Amino acid sequence: MGILRLFLAITVVIAHVGQMPYVNALIGGPQAVQVFFMISGFYMALVLNEKYDRAGPFYWARISKLYSFYFVALAVAIFVAGATGTNHFTAILTGDWDLPSKTLAVMSNLFIVGSDWILFAYPSPDGLAFTSSFTTQAPRFDEVVYLIPAWSLPLEMAFYLIAPFVVRRPGALLGLAALSVISRYFTYQFFGAGDPWSYRFFPSELIFFIIGVGGYYTYRQVRCWRLTPALGWAGLIWLIALMVWIGRYAPISQAVPFSKYGLIFYLSAACALPFIFAATKDVKFDRAVGEFSYPIYLVHIVVVLAFLEPGAPQLNGPTIVAISVLAGMAITPIGQALHRTMLKTPAIFVRRRSGIVGAAE
């Protein structure tokens, strides 16, 4: 599903850049992220059923992948921000905030943890406080975050935490799916359907991960069909065409993500994912381009914000999107190298302790 993941990442870039001809923001950044959650659910069910029989190695593989690319993107963000005269850490540490507020801001920058919580809180004069709409409060935590898109990573991590215990249990999945739908209903009733409740609250977003898990089990049933590759490529083309068409003629409101066209898109993605994976899983090109999606998703905001700085060159939207994509591609080999190093780390410790090579693999 590499081509699809790359297209979704570029969709998020376009949503943040704007100024694009022919389309507003394709399907919109929130919808692209939610399909990423579906894909994550699919892959986690895949690896837990076919690769990992223990939770420990699974956790380390996932965390090392998230953090390896995150640290590289963060280093780029800090360098670029410093070059433009911005230092978020100085602003946090010298700000008139209480210790919990400063701790949350630093932790969300350095270690990802809290990157979603900052969208439900703000540093009020009386201390760290809850807010149902972070965009209406001042100051805002997200204004001192180097990698704003990292808010979605704690949601991924929360799903990784529970995945080994639920993806093989249909009853647990159905129960969690029901609770997720109930969560969305009540949060919409109490707080509204706008940001951050529309797509950043993990209990409500859990349904998308579970849909992806269901997609994996569908794939297991249909992978022997002779028409599966043809259906997969047709599904991929349909999804991309639908994303472009919706962006051009029926843009989905972020505040009401479950509009008629939104539901058509989600349903299409849920049905297509098993077939797309079956068609592309052995295609080297698809796998290669998919490796760019996560780095592009992380680092593009650095490029976008850099060109919003006073005195920055005035470039059009397509040019900024192109630079963002190239930046993500450029850091990919570095992130991959760091990921390989991190994957070996537990094995080194095990060898030193017990002499068993590869015991942590």
Image (cartoon, rainbow, N blue to C red):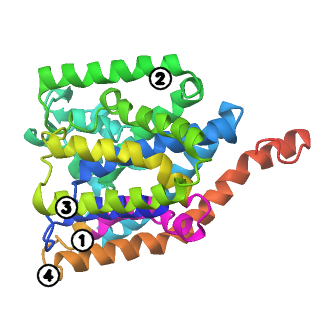
Single out the residue that lies furthest toward the right: 355
Residue to which mark 3 is pinned: 245
Give the mark toward the camera: 1 or 4. 4
User: Measured from the top left, where is residue 319 in percent x and y?
Assistant: 24, 80
Could you say which is closer to the camera, residue 36 or residue 297? 36
| Image quadrant in which you'd find residue 208 | top left
Give the mark toward the camera: 2 or 4. 2
Could you say which is closer to the camera, residue 252 or residue 296? 252
Image mark for residue 314: 4
**Residue 16 sits above or below residue 170 on the image:** below
Residue type, mark 4 in image? Gln
Q: Main secondary structure of the magenta part?
A: helix
* Residue 229 forms part of the magenta stretch: no
Residue type, mark 1 in image? Ala
Image mark for residue 173: 2
Residue type, mark 3 in image? Trp
Could you say which is closer to the camera, residue 250 or residue 128? 250
Cα–Cα gap, marks 3 and 2 = 33 Å
Residue type, mark 2 in image? Leu
Single out the residue that lies furthest toward the left: 136
